[in-house]
Structures are given as structure tokens and as C-alpha cells.
Amino acid sequence: MSLRRPNAFTTVRTIAALCLIAVPIQARAEVPPNGVAAMTTAYAAMDARARQTRAKGTLPRWSVVSDRAVLEQVWNSPAILGTPPYTAKDVPLLIGIGEQQSAIYKTYVLFSSNPTTLPDMAQNSTLFQDEITRASIMTTMTLAAEAEAIGDFIVHLPPDQMTDVRRQGLKGFRLGMLELISGFTIMLRSPSLTTDNRALLIDSLAAEAPALAAAAPRGDRSAFVATVNTVIPSLPPDLQSKMAVFVKAMSTDPCERLCAIP
């Protein structure tokens, strides 16, 4: 595979999925019937294109027409994720989609044209910012969907079935989710991020903030707010208002479901 191999977070995702699907929940899935197939097909096409471009010392680019056609499919959220609400039945589907989206994101962040050298992540963040921005957005959307579906699972889980293994799996997923979202908020501070890409990322964070906040402990929410507050003063008014939506969602008091797992 030319795309990044799954890391510890994707392994935790898989464990969490196994823990969750062990308990049957009668709920209607909202991931499109062909969503997983669409992701699988798009991921395979992305991998094939990455093999071709790596031979030339790069990765598929948003600015290249032939590459963009492939990237548009792998980040086609309506076809892959559908729309909320997401329920417990969606968890196994979303876990698989999330692993593939995370792998694509890491492929760009950790790219090295020479396999024998360590990646220059600072350089990658500038060179591939169009692709990293869009990979971040799709990953954010997938994480929000996973968090909502897992929250629904927790609501329906009998208390005596919240085993230690299941609790650790849920906590592991939550930790990985928080680390990724933290990275996306920090990315907003990058001076090399273009105005258009910053606006796209802010739109995504604002849109998914309620679902992400519902899964995040208060301390982590406060950290996200502190990060974006360093960015807000430099933003134009329209983006400031969108960041205010993010801050408001992250400042809510309720801590239930995934947030409340000790």
C-alpha cells in the first residue's frame, strides 16, 4: 500500500468497534447503504494514484485535474457519510471509514520523497496544504459521526455490560479523536495557511462542534477554546462569527455519553 498504514488510533478504533457490536442494538443506520462501498472504491483509486505519483516524488494534488477527480471521490462526504443523525448501528461502518480517512490524512502529513529519510512535516503542511485541509475536514466529519453513533450506543447499553475492556476501548477512541481535533485547531494558527483553506477548516470545525463537544471532556474543550481564541482576533468578521459558534459549543456544560466515560 502506498497510503499510510493504520496507527495505534486506528487499532483502538477497531477494538472499540468489536466491543460495541458485541451488543445488538435496534437502531436505524444513517450511513448510506453504499457508503462503505463508495469509500472502499475511492480509497483503492487513491492508493493506485498515490503509487503513480510517488514514483515522481510527490502525491496526488488538488490542483492537478486528473488527481482532483480521484480526491473528490475519497472526500465525497454525501456519498460516504450521508447525513446525521448517526446511531449505534452505524458504528462498525463509520469505524472502517474513519480508519481509511485517517490513513489518507497521515499520508500527506508524513510524506517523504525518500523512504530512507524522516518526513519534513512542516514542509508538508505548506506544500500539501490544499490536500491536508480537505483531509482534515473529512476526518473531522467522520470523527463527529463516529462520536454521535458511539454516544447512541452508550445510551442503549445496559449498565452491567459496560465492561472494563469496553470502557478502555471507548476511552482510547476518545483520546485519539481529541488528539486529531487538537491538531486541526492548531493548524489554524499556521501563517502559511491560505485564507481560503483557513475558511474551509473553520467552516468544518464550526459545523461539527456540537457533536465533538458532546464527546469531549471539559478540560479538552477548554484547551480547544484557548487555541482558537489565539486565532480569532486575526480573522475577518464572518470567520470570527463562525469561530464563535465553535467556542459556544465547546463551552457547554453537559458531559454525558462518551464525554462521561471515566
Image (cartoon, rainbow, N blue to C red):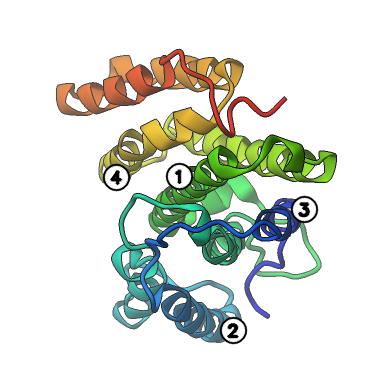
Q: Position of residue 60 (x, y in %)?
A: 46, 73
Viewer-side label of 3, 1: 1
- Locate the N terminus and report the quarter of the image it occupies: bottom right
Classify 244 as above or below 57. above
Q: Residues within 10 Å of mark 2 (few under 14, many from 20)?
A: some
Q: Quadrant of residue 3?
A: bottom right
| Amino acid at pointer 2 | Arg
Say what amino acid the circle numbered 3 marks. Answer: Ala
- Residue at position x 53%, y 66% in the image: 93
Q: Earlier in the sequence, mark 1 or mark 2?
A: 2
Which sits earlier in the primary sequence, circle 3 or circle 1? 3
Q: CA distance from mark 1 to mark 2?
A: 30 Å
Residue underneath mark 1: 144
SS at badge 3: helix
Q: Is residue 81 left or right of residue 153?
A: left
- Against 244, residue 93 (above or below) is below
The residue indicated by pointer 4 is 200
Q: Secondary structure at mark 1?
A: helix
Q: Residue furthest left?
A: 238
Q: Residues within 10 Å of mark 4 (few under 14, many from 20)?
A: some
Q: Quadrant for residue 95, please give it.
A: bottom right
> Of circles 1 and 2, which is in front?
1
Judge depth for marks 4 and 3 and give the one in front. Answer: 3
Mark 1: amino acid: Ala
Image vertical order of residue 138 relative to residue 178, above or below? below
